[in-house]
């Protein structure tokens, strides 16, 4: 009986070590939306350098890459990034953003949000709007078909 208990405890410890603090897989192991010929709005796999992570309480990771994306948008140069945000419960929401020089395609994958509506939403937008207040700066996609605005990122001051 004791060897079985020891085996169960060791298995639990090993499995717990493969997760981050929120019980999620590390970002490098997360599935991403792949390019498909039948879907021109889908994005290819992005490298970790192109991922902006928005934790609930820590500073935004790789924020300079987001600002680089904005510069390229203003210069009408093609670029793509992924924004990973977390729900209050720690579930990940992925937003792939691709700019082709004219249109910003956004794919939001909230299928891992256990308390949200889930699913994948796509939109094609023409502008990035910046709204500043004393506490924060909001970056929004505007000119989207069938939608008013899509939140890209909130940067707290």
Image (cartoon, helix red, strand yellow):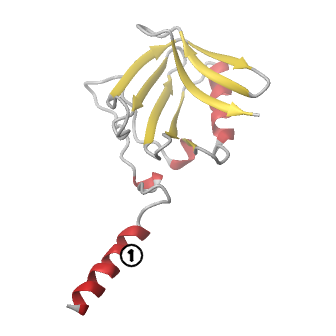
Residue that extends furthest to the right in the rendered view of this protein: 134
Q: Report x, y in % for residue 60.
A: 64, 43
- Local crowd size for mark 1, using a 10 Å CA cut-off: few (<14), some (14–19), many (≥20): few
Q: Residue 138 vs residue 108: left or right?
A: right
Q: Report x, y in % for residue 29.
A: 40, 55
The residue lying at 72 percent from left, 28 percent from top is: 136
Q: Residue 140 vs residue 147: left or right?
A: right
Residue 65's image quarter? top right
Residue 113's image quarter? top left
Q: Residue 90 vs residue 33: left or right?
A: right
Rendered-image quadrant of the N terminus: bottom left
Say which of 149 and 76 sits in front. 149
Residue that extends furthest to the left in the rendered view of this protein: 1
**Circle 1 sits in a helix, a strand or a loop, which is it?**
helix
Q: Is residue 139 above or below residue 84?
A: above
Residue that extends furthest to the front in the rendered view of this protein: 1
Say which of 99 and 77 sits in front. 99
Q: Report x, y in % for residue 116.
A: 38, 32
Q: Which residue is mark 1?
A: 13
């Amino acid at each position: 009986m004791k060897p079985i208990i020891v085996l169960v405890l060791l298995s639990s410890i090993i499995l717990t070590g493969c997760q981050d603090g929120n019980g999620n897989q590390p970002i490098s192991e997360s599935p991403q939306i792949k390019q498909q010929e039948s879907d021109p709005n889908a994005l290819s796999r992005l490298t970790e350098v192109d991922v902006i992570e928005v934790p609930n309480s820590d500073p935004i990771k790789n924020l300079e890459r987001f600002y680089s994306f904005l510069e390229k948008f203003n210069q009408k140069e093609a670029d793509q990034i992924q924004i990973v945000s977390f729900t209050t419960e720690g579930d990940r929401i992925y937003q792939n953003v691709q700019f082709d020089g004219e249109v910003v395609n956004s794919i939001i994958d909230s299928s891992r949000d256990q308390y949200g509506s889930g699913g994948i939403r796509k939109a094609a937008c023409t502008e990035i709007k910046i709204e500043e207040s004393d506490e924060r700066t909001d970056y929004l996609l505007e000119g989207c078909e069938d939608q008013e605005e899509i939140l890209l990122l909130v940067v707290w001051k």
